[in-house]
Image: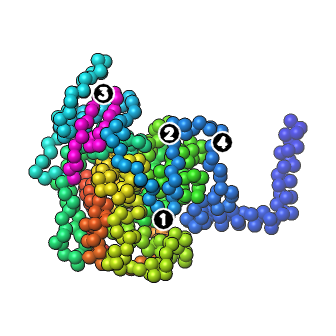
């Protein structure tokens, strides 16, 4: 008791004495802490840990076997140039589509679609222990006007336990995220579009028309609950408003009290668009508070094979021609807030000053097929056939169709940059724990200041004749994916009771 009374009597005295003798030091530290916290809460400092302390080592030195089940480190580094991966290998044979044994139930409807669309194949004897799969009634398909490109069908084998897929088959369990690495699947042939949009005779003075998907019956479950309420992954498409989204999420993370992190290429050693190990390591060893929202350039992957619950995937898509234009000039001139171009452009001064219209007129390689920057892959995945930059049209078709399937079934929501206000309203409706107040934050003075600082400088907008060239040439499949995604997005708006405030496609916004 004597010690307790002595401490109770003398401790306040010692504290007061210390404060009197060191008042300047105490006040200076309090002022510095207040300034740092004010800057952090108002978005001027994005990450206190990264700004004021050493970068953490994300290498897992305690669990050497964490990635022994197939983690890959791609040679493709997540830089701003997005160089294509080597694709010198020929197309795989049908045997390469054989999938591993996974005790996952087969969707009866998908199985029936594959069986009806596949070419006649020799009968495959069923295993004695396997019970027959009773197919559900298939949805009627309008054969007179199919919505997707038809490709040659190959025999498909459907079993109750052993999953197999041919080049035209897609068998996937419901409510799962993007497929695992190595699962080379594409949607059922009944969903393939017959032709790309014919805009050869369209008026070149206006934007090229989009493929009409208004009559397409989306198989999306619009009442689907959030797949994973604790882990949201925005695997951001580059040059599609991700810097603005980052600034919004910084402020929303503090307002709505969730753990938010943006990962840049330098944050994780050995990282890349298709590398799985560094990202899995980060989530397992460095995410300590939930719910968690991650913003990162990364191709979709399967977290479940690493014993991590599949995150809820979201993204934002952009008009392909505008996306290309932003990439093209950013590589040359960078952002408003930074005078250099990050050293990503290697060429002469003449090349640097060449506009996109001149690039197309001169048939410069950068504007010809194949375009090296990745677009479809961010919705398709990180394995064949998702390398749509291979220059092989058949691969690009399959990648587009797989991306459509993922957007329709596996992504929880994909917004549209040209309808960004609508996108934020939809995200607020579908993910209120994270995005409540997003529209208000987006229209704040702070975000307006940030947006002005991250605009690409030196951009000379392409004319609509150049847009038609891209829509019918190098970006024809990107445009088809964009049209499909935008139609699905507006269908979501309609079902959510959200009135769009955006201008229709092709109509210039009112300033």
The local crowd at label 1, few if under 14, some if 14 to 19, many if 20 or more residues have their Cα within 10 Å, is: some
Q: Quadrant of the N terminus?
A: top right
Residue 120: percent from the left, percent from the top? 17, 35
Q: Secondary structure at mark 4?
A: loop
Cα distance in 3D space between marks 3 and 2: 25 Å
> Is residue 182 visible to the viewer in this orientation of the structure?
yes
Residue behind mark 4: 61
**Front tag of 3 and 2:** 2
Mark 4 or mark 2, which has the lower sequence index? Answer: 4
Please report contact status of discs 1 and 2: CB closer than 8 Å, yes or no: no
Residue behind mark 3: 160
Q: Residue at x 76, y 65 (%)?
A: 27
Name which quarter of the figure residue 101 lies in: top left
Mark drawn on residue 428 = none
Locate residue 308 relative to residue 385 in the image: left or right. Answer: right
For the residue pair 35 and 179, the one nearer the viewer reads as: 179
Locate residue 327 relative to residue 494 in the image: left or right. Answer: right
Q: Residue at x 26, y 71 (%)?
A: 468
Residue behind mark 1: 81
């Amino acid at each position: 008791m004597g010690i307790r009374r002595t401490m109770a009597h003398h401790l306040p005295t010692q504290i007061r004495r210390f404060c009197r003798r060191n008042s300047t030091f105490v006040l200076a530290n309090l002022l510095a802490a207040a300034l740092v916290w004010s800057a952090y809460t108002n978005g001027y400092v994005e990450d206190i840990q990264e700004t004021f302390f050493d970068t953490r080592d994300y290498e897992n030195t305690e669990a050497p076997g964490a990635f022994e089940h197939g983690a890959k480190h791609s040679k493709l580094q997540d830089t701003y140039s997005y160089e294509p991966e080597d694709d010198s290998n020929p197309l795989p044979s049908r045997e390469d589509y054989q999938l591993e044994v996974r005790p996952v139930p087969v969707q009866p409807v998908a199985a029936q679609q594959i069986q009806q669309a596949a070419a006649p194949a020799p009968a495959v004897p069923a295993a004695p222990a396997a019970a027959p799969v009773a197919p559900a009634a298939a949805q009627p398909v309008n054969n007179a006007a199919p919505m997707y490109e038809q490709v040659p069908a190959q025999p498909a084998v459907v079993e109750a336990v052993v999953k197999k897929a041919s080049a035209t088959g897609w068998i996937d369990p419901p409510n799962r995220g993007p497929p695992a690495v190595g699962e080379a699947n594409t949607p059922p042939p009944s969903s393939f579009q017959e032709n790309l949009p014919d805009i050869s005779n369209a008026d070149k003075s206006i934007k090229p028309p989009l493929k009409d998907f208004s009559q397409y019956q989306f198989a999306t479950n619009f009442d689907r609950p959030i797949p994973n309420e604790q882990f949201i992954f925005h695997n951001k498409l580059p040059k599609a408003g991700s810097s603005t989204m980052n600034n919004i999420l910084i402020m929303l993370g503090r307002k709505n009290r969730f753990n938010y992190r943006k990962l840049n290429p330098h944050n994780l050693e050995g990282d890349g668009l298709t590398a799985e190990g560094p990202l899995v390591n980060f989530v397992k060893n460095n995410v300590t508070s939930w719910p968690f929202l991650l913003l990162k350039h990364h191709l979709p992957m399967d977290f479940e094979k690493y014993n991590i619950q599949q995150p809820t995937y979201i993204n934002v898509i952009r008009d392909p021609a505008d996306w290309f234009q932003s990439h093209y000039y950013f590589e040359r001139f960078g952002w408003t807030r930074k005078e250099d171009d990050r050293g990503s452009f290697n060429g002469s001064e003449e090349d640097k000053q060449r506009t996109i219209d001149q690039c197309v007129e001169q048939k410069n390689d950068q504007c010809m097929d194949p375009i090296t920057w990745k677009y479809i892959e961010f919705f398709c995945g990180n394995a064949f056939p998702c390398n749509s930059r291979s220059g092989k049209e058949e691969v690009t078709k399959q990648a587009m169709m797989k991306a459509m399937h993922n957007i329709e079934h596996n992504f929880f929501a994909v917004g549209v940059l040209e309808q960004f206000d609508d996108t934020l309203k939809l995200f607020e409706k579908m993910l209120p724990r994270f995005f409540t107040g997003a529209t208000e934050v987006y229209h704040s003075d702070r975000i307006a200041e940030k947006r002005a600082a991250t605009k690409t400088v030196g951009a000379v907008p392409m004319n609509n004749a150049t847009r038609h060239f891209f829509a019918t040439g190098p970006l024809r499949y990107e445009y088809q994916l964009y049209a499909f995604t935008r139609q699905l997005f507006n269908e979501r708006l309609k079902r959510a009771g959200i009135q769009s405030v955006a201008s229709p496609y092709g109509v210039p916004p009112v300033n």
